[in-house]
Image (spheres, rainbow, N blue to C red):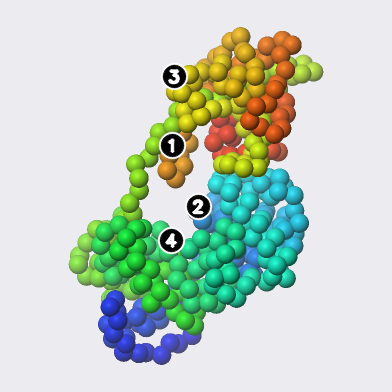
Amino acid sequence: MQANNETTTTTPYFTGGERDSIRRQLLEWYDQEKRSMPWRDNPSEYRTVVSEFMLQQTRVDTALPYFERFTARFPGWRALAEADEQDVLNAWSGLGYYRRARMLKRAAETVHHKYGGKLPRDAKKLAALPGFGEYTTGAVGSIALGMALPLVDGNVRRVVGRLRALEGPLNAGPGKQALWDVCTEMVDPERPGDFNQALMELGATVCSPQDPMCLVCPVFAHCQARAKGDPTRYSGRIERPPLRIVQEIAVVLTKEIKGREQILLLRRGESGSFSGMWELPRLDEREIEEDELTPERVLFEVVRIRPRTAESIGEAESSFTHHKIKTRLFKCPMPPRAAVRRQRHVQHEWIRPEEFEKLPSSKAQRRLLELALKKE
Ligand code: SF4
């Protein structure tokens, strides 16, 4: 543990040597309690960036096997910069939020071609890299480069919100400003990466949303929410717009080829959401009037096929940040002598169901395929 000098500075959020005490106690706790993770145990600038992109929307346990496979397949900036984007999406397949994979590849291209394989040591240049938002800039800057930058994720929001008993939504307006001010002031200038990871680790393992373990918390003595007797009241509340429900229809279009049933998959173009990914023919109510949303209409709009029958084979839900998609799934045999004429996609393939795994596709599409296969 590296010692920090005790100071007696008083600030709007900390009194006397409180800030230094919090830093010291948190870092001592982190040194003893931090969980082993491949990007911590064997760090590099590249591995830190890959891990932070994966962790933007994904839990640590889920990201771990993907991280190992991804970094084995693309071990450094150059390998990722020069890789085919479809291969990158393939390696990311199943993690969801594929925009992250595309942005990560673009960031690798910039680091490799523009910065000679080293991250820029400048917060503004770092923040300008593809896919680097507030959180990733703080995480990569502090963890990989030792820059005294704060970061805020859900765990930090809750821990810091409780430490200083911050009121109101903390993702907008004065609440967000106060939160970032506290984090900026708190971050340890000598070990910023460890300090930020300690805050996140505390939120993940001790200061849980509903049942914080205050008695074993290293910053118990400085926690204002705990002192007020009701830490769960200060849970880093954020304001979210109401979740929109979107109706969708997806179709498993089947055709017998060489005595085996095959299904039609389509690849999306390079712009918009899920770009470059493979999917079933589908449309939702944002693309077509809800009362016209039928399997027949979907197939006609997407591939100019007019099916003779459509069998309902199930329903599924997929949640995204701001909306939830409710999908009704149908199975239609390909009419004889009909031909696929793509209207919205750039490629199509007839594949056997077991081949689906090889093509990059979203979690939602995988779930639909699994549903279709169960019905067979
Ligand atoms: Fe969270 Fe309790 Fe620690 Fe405060 S004392 S930071 S509420 S675990």
| Label disc, if present, on residue 294 of the rendered structure | none
The Cα atoms of the two marked residues, 4 and 2, are separated by: 10 Å
Which residue type carries mark 2? Gln
The quadrant of the image that shows the C terminus is top right
The answer to which of 172 and 17 lies nearer the viewer is 172
Residue 236 in sight from this viewpoint: no
| Label disc, if present, on residue 153 of the rendered structure | 4
Tell me if 132 is positioned left or right of 10 in this view: right
The answer to which of 256 and 178 lies nearer the viewer is 178
Considering only order in the chain, which callout, 3 or 2, is on the residue closer to the N terminus?
A: 2
Residue occupying image coordinates x 73% and y 29% = 349
Choose top left, top right, bottom left or bottom right for residue 368: top right
Does 55 appear above or below 43?
A: above
Which residue type carries mark 1? Lys
Question: Residue 138: image x %, image y %?
Answer: 50, 68
Residue occupying image coordinates x 53% and y 57% = 55
Question: Residue 323: image x %, image y %?
Answer: 43, 39
| Label disc, if present, on residue 57 of the rendered structure | 2
Q: Are marks 3 and 4 in contact (CB under 8 Å)?
A: no
- How many numbered tags mark residues here? 4
Q: Secondary structure at mark 4?
A: loop
Does 326 appear above or below 70?
A: above
Considering only order in the chain, which callout, 2 or 4, is on the residue closer to the N terminus?
A: 2
Tell me if 144 is positioned left or right of 214 in this view: right
The Cα atoms of the two marked residues, 3 and 1, are separated by: 19 Å
Tell me if 53 is positioned left or right of 226 in this view: right
Q: Secondary structure at mark 2?
A: loop
The Cα atoms of the two marked residues, 2 and 1, are separated by: 16 Å
Considering only order in the chain, which callout, 4 or 3, is on the residue closer to the N terminus?
A: 4
